[in-house]
C-alpha cells in the first residue's frame, strides 16, 4: 500500500467475530472519530431464474455483508465514540433502497435496511454526541463497473449524461464526517445526478 499515515487491516464483514477483531485492532492503534461503512456486494439472483440454493445463499451473504456487517461495526464504534463524547458514522446506502433491483432484490433490501438502521442509530446515539448519516449513490464510475456505466441504458437515465465520480461521492462523505451540522443526523443524502428522484 503506497503512502503513509494509514494502516490496512483485513476482515470478513460477513463474520461477526472478524468484525470484532477488526475493531479491536483498529482502536488499539489510535482514537477513532469517524467510520464509513462502504463495503458491499451485488450478486445477481433474479427470482424466476435462480434455484433455491443459490437464492438463499445470495440473501444470506448479501445481508451479512451489506447490513449486519455495518450494524456490528457501528455497534463497536458507537460504544467507543459514546465514551469519547463524540464521533460520526457514515453508512453508504444506494438509490436501490428506494427503486428496487429486480435482478438483485437482496441488495435493494439490504440497503433499505441500512437506511432504517442508520436512522435508528441516529436517534439512539445523538444524546451521546455520536452522529449518524447516510450517503446514497446511484451508479459511480469505479473500476469495477467501468463497462456498465458506459451502457446506453445506464447513460439514458442520467440527466448529467454521465454517472457520479468517486471524487463526488467522497466529497459528500467527507462533509458528513467533518462538517455536517448536528441537525442533519439521520439524513439520507442522494448522490445520483437526479437519475432517481424521491419525495
Image (cartoon, helix red, strand yellow):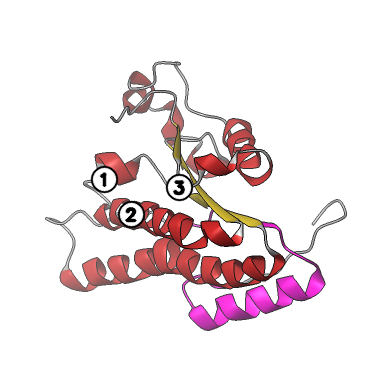
Q: Is residue 55 above or below residue 96?
A: below
The reply to whether residue 89 is in sight is yes
Which residue does the image show at 59% across and 62% down from the upper left? Answer: 128
Mark 2 lies on a secondary structure that is helix
Which residue does the image show at 65% across and 74% down from the upper left? Answer: 23
Residue at far bottom of view: 17
Q: Sequence-wise, which precedes: disc 1 or disc 3?
A: 1
Mark 1 lies on a secondary structure that is loop
> Residue 168 appears in which quarter of the rendering?
top right
- How far apart marks 3 and 2 lie (CA) works out to 21 Å
Span of residues in magenta: 12-40
Q: Which residue is mark 3?
A: 186
- How far apart marks 1 and 3 lie (CA) works out to 24 Å
Q: Sequence-wise, which precedes: disc 3 or disc 2?
A: 2
The reply to whether residue 90 is in sight is no
Q: Which residue is mark 1?
A: 101
User: Does the magenta run of residues contain 30?
Assistant: yes
Image quadrant where one finds the N terminus: bottom right
Which residue does the image show at 32% across and 52% down from the upper left? Answer: 112
- Coordinates of residue 30 in the picture (x, y in percent): 80, 68
Q: Which residue is mark 2?
A: 107
Q: Sequence-wise, which precedes: disc 1 or disc 2?
A: 1
User: Does the magenta run of residues contain 45?
Assistant: no
> Residue 95 appears in which quarter of the rendering?
top left
In front: label 3 or label 2: 3
- Coordinates of residue 160 in the picture (x, y in percent): 45, 16
Amino acid at each position: 500500500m503506497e503512502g503513509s499515515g494509514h494502516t490496512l487491516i483485513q476482515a470478513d464483514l460477513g463474520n461477526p467475530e472478524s468484525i470484532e477483531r477488526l475493531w479491536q485492532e483498529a482502536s488499539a492503534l489510535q482514537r477513532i472519530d469517524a467510520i464509513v461503512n462502504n463495503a458491499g456486494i451485488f450478486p445477481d439472483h433474479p427470482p424466476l431464474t435462480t434455484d433455491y440454493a443459490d437464492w438463499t445463499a445470495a440473501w444470506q451473504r448479501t445481508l451479512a455483508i451489506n447490513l449486519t456487517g455495518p450494524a456490528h461495526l457501528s455497534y463497536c464504534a458507537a460504544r467507543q465514540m459514546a465514551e469519547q463524547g463524540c464521533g460520526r458514522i457514515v453508512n453508504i446506502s444506494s438509490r436501490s433502497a428506494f427503486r428496487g433491483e429486480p435482478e438483485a432484490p437482496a441488495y435493494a433490501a439490504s440497503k433499505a435496511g441500512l437506511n432504517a438502521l442508520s436512522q435508528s442509530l441516529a436517534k439512539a446515539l445523538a444524546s451521546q454526541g455520536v452522529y449518524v448519516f447516510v450517503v446514497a449513490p446511484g451508479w459511480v464510475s469505479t473500476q469495477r463497473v467501468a463497462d456498465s456505466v458506459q451502457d446506453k441504458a445506464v447513460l439514458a437515465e442520467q440527466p448529467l449524461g454521465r454517472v457520479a465520480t468517486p471524487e463526488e461521492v467522497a466529497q459528500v462523505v467527507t462533509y458528513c464526517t467533518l462538517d455536517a451540522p448536528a441537525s442533519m443526523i439521520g439524513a439520507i443524502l442522494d448522490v445520483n445526478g437526479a437519475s432517481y428522484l424521491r419525495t
